[in-house]
Amino acid sequence: MCKFHKDVAMSVATSPVTGQFDTVYYSLTLCALAKFWVNKYMPDMGHLDGYSPYELSSDAAQKSFAESGLGQEGDEIPDGLHDRIRNMIGDYITRHPVDHKSLNLPQAPHHNPRFLDVVTMSIYEGEVADGLTVKLSVDNARHEPLRAAIEGLYKEAGFAEMIEAALKESICALFADTPRQVNPQFLSVYNRLPTGLRTAFGSCSLHGGGGALAHVVVCGTLNMGIGGFSGAFLNAAMYGIAPAVAMGTTYVVEKYRMNDFNPYKYILPMALSLGAAFGAARFLPHEHSTDPRMQWFYGFTPVQRHQQLQVDYQRYLRLPQQLRDEVDKEASRQKMTVAMFMTSLEVCGGDLTPQIKAFEEQSTKNAPIPRTAKQELH
């Protein structure tokens, strides 16, 4: 279901007096609204879901809306339409006792749309342009109570006209409001994108939270699982893992929402995930011991490397306790010895480098001048 439908259902299901939300009113209204779709009035706009202000503001969508004549019809829709629908559904519930349990509704249907999406696909038949009709029966017994309720509501005089008018009103409101929410310069660029890519951007903006969560969980778990390897290995692995996670999560979401195949919805998340992996490898802390700039160190003989590590470890011992604690923590996080961490800081820099250098410079200034040096000064 799209925003055009859900805005109406949310309004009807929310009491104007108490503000209380009723899942039965919501489910009945949403299932009834599914008889009418945007592409009945704008045949080329079947992909619209109402959630993307830029898509609604695009030249193609605005032209299609203008040619549909919905704007003129919207001006003639009477006030209080949602209240009238609420009252009609309330009268039906009173005469045909139905409740959350008897309709087999999930716990929170407004947060779990799949059940109602499946029901609406099973209880209607026909073509959108010609007008859908309620089936006489459904294969899934769990959907039958909702089918029977929708059939009963559509037998009520005036109900079909009010429901369709409410959807038209919702379409008009969103088309009128969204152009004020977009940046004109961004919209100019957006208008030049292929329709499929624009749809993918809308999908990413709507479902990005779930995809991001999947990336955090999966990639975070893999990070911990292979964290014992070098930072270079881990960064390289993410270039393969991130796109795989992007494709996997996109496939699951698309199958769950029963969307038609759109290649852009796979290409875009993959590109974004590769960009994120590159950014993480480039800008986030990583294990300096594998940095190419450390080649000077590995060019030493074993004895020279040992001597260098000893020098840097002595530097560590001269640090104040608080700074040593931070070095310990960061070295442990990067799975390096303290000496190697101190050596790598000298080459690669890091958040602790300014603090360490500031302390060492201050210590040098405060150090007592050797006696021989004093004699030379005289």
Image (cartoon, helix red, strand yellow):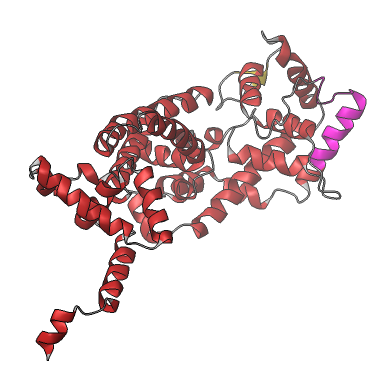
Q: Is residue 38 left or right of residue 112?
A: left
- Observer-nearest residue: 28 or 282? 282
The structure residue drawn at horizontal position 81% and vertical position 39%, both measured from the top left corner, is 86
Residue 94 x %, y % = 91, 29
- Observer-nearest residue: 7 or 302? 302
The structure residue drawn at horizontal position 54% and vertical position 50%, both measured from the top left corner, is 175
Image quarter (top left, top right, bottom left or bottom right) of the C terminus: bottom left
Residue 104 x %, y % = 76, 19
- Observer-nearest residue: 37 or 271? 271
- Would residue 100 be counted in the magenta stretch? yes
Give the magenta-colored segment's residue range.
84-102
- Can the viewer see residue 350 in this picture? no
Image quarter (top left, top right, bottom left or bottom right) of the N terminus: top right
Residue 87 x %, y % = 85, 39
Q: Is residue 123 above or below residue 31?
A: above
| Residue 249 in which image quadrant | top left
